[in-house]
Amino acid sequence: MPDRRRPSKDPLSELAAREEAMYLRRSSTRFLECAIHLCVTHMTLQEVADLLEKEAAQLRHFG
């Protein structure tokens, strides 16, 4: 009778993929924080807040 169990995935590959995904999330967050900081150096806090709210609304609408 053939073995119908699912083949086990390589645990090291799975760990590497998870770590890469977490690294990319942290890097993306850091980039966003830097972009916001740059905006604040040239715009008022209210203007930046309004801009972020508009962007968030677009993400919610199209996401």
Image (cartoon, rainbow, N blue to C red):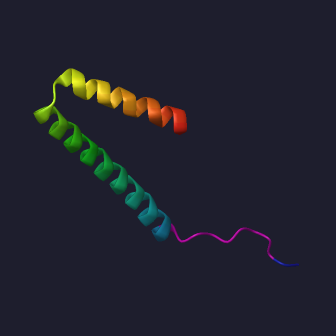
Of 57 and 4, the residue lying toward us: 57
Prevalent SS, magenta region: loop
- Residue 32 sits in quarter: top left
Q: Is residue 45 above or below residue 15?
A: above
Query: Could you tell me which residue is drawn at 30 percent across and 30 percent down?
Result: 51
Residue at the bottom extreme of this rendering: 1
Residue 38: give x, y in percent of width and height: 16, 40
Of 58 and 4, the residue lying toward us: 58
Residue 53: give x, y in percent of width and height: 36, 26
Counting every numbered tag in the picture gives 0
Query: Could you tell me which residue is drawn at 88 percent across and 78 percent down?
Result: 1
> In this picture, which residue range is highlighted in magenta?
3-11
Of 28 and 48, the residue lying toward us: 48
Q: Is residue 40 above or below residue 2?
A: above
- State left or right for residue 36 relative to residue 53: left
Membership of 50 in magenta stretch:
no
Q: Is residue 29 above or below residue 4?
A: above
Query: Could you tell me which residue is drawn at 25 percent across and 46 percent down?
Result: 30
Residue at the right extreme of this rendering: 1
Residue 57: give x, y in percent of width and height: 45, 29
- State left or right for residue 36 relative to residue 57: left
- Residue 5 sits in quarter: bottom right
- State left or right for residue 49 relative to residue 21: left
Of 9 and 17, the residue lying toward us: 17
Query: Could you tell me which residue is drawn at 58 percent across and 69 percent down?
Result: 9
Residue 29: give x, y in percent of width and height: 30, 44
